[in-house]
Amino acid sequence: MDITRRDALALSSSTLAGLSLGMISAGRIAAQAAPQQTQEWPGTLMETPLREGFPVPLPLNPDGSAPEHPESAAGPIEGPLMWRTADRTTPPGEYDYRQMAIKVDTRGLARLRGTLRFADLERLPRVSGTYLLQCGAPVPHGIVKWTGVRFSDFADMLGLVPGAQYARFLATDGQYVDEDIETLRHRQVMLAWMMNDEPIPADHGAPLRLVIPFRYGRRSLKAITEIVFGTPALPAPPILS
């Protein structure tokens, strides 16, 4: 691929490195370069308009937990799908929770490691909770009944040691979230495979979804493929090509 001197100056050194390895496309390079070509970055801190309507309030109880709703209030999630794929469509993968095969890397911080199957989760107490799922923007949002297992029970099944501090969840679309173990052990946090008494649809995170009802929806990661534990922190995931 040929780029002009002007393009080269506009690109960051990390972007050029990716170009030399063939890791990024011409379209992505142009998208990264365009804002720098059309608008000069301010040399000082300056007043900037806030994003209108963002973030919307996330109603919580005084103790920081999420309000629980009656099952009769449960319904669909309204709004666009929030996938990281280029066209925002649902990525391919295994959607049947009974066929899930999720890598669990405890890195010496638990008694068990390997591949998580649904049979492992079936042994744990099943729980349900009906909560508001709200993104930072007005949509997507909806009151949803989730069914699965508490993350704390899952962690205990693994034999996670007290010194483990973080878990990273990775998804089929390359998205990931890091969360501290104390938060994940909250009684409302679960690994869910059912949504409104039906298997979670592919669009909303089958076969297994993390549910943290007192966080904005992005933290409730969809379509988990891998769970990694670490302390005190985890390295950054590899850059997607």
Image: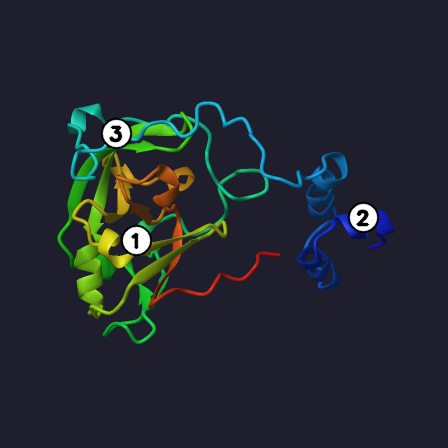
Q: Which residue is mark 2?
A: 7
- Compared across the picture, whether 153 is left or right of 227 comes to left
The amino acid sitting under disc 1 is Arg
Callout count: 3
Please state which of residues 232 and 31 is positioned toward the viewer in this rendering.
Answer: 232
Q: Which residue is mark 3?
A: 59
Mark with earlier residue (3, 1): 3
Residue 135, image x and y in percent?
Answer: 38, 33
The amino acid sitting under disc 2 is Asp
Query: Any mark on residue 186, and which?
Result: none
Q: Quadrant of residue 213?
A: top left
- Give the secondary structure at mark 1: helix
Pick out the residue farthest to the left: 125
Mark with earlier residue (2, 3): 2
Name the image quarter holding the C terminus. Answer: bottom right
Q: Say which of marks 2 and 1 sits in front.
A: 2
- Give the secondary structure at mark 2: helix
Residue pictured at 38% horizontal, 25% vertical: 78
Callout 3–callout 1 Cβ contact below 8 Å: no
Q: How are the colours assigned in the image? A: rainbow
Please state which of residues 54 and 143 is positioned toward the viewer in this rendering.
Answer: 54
- Give the secondary structure at mark 3: loop
Q: Which residue is mark 1?
A: 98
Residue 4 appears anywhere in the view: no
Residue 58, image x and y in percent?
Answer: 30, 31
Residue pictured at 85% horizontal, 53% vertical: 2
Q: CA distance from mark 2 to mark 1?
A: 49 Å
Q: CA distance from mark 3 to mark 1?
A: 34 Å
Residue 110, image x and y in percent?
Answer: 25, 72
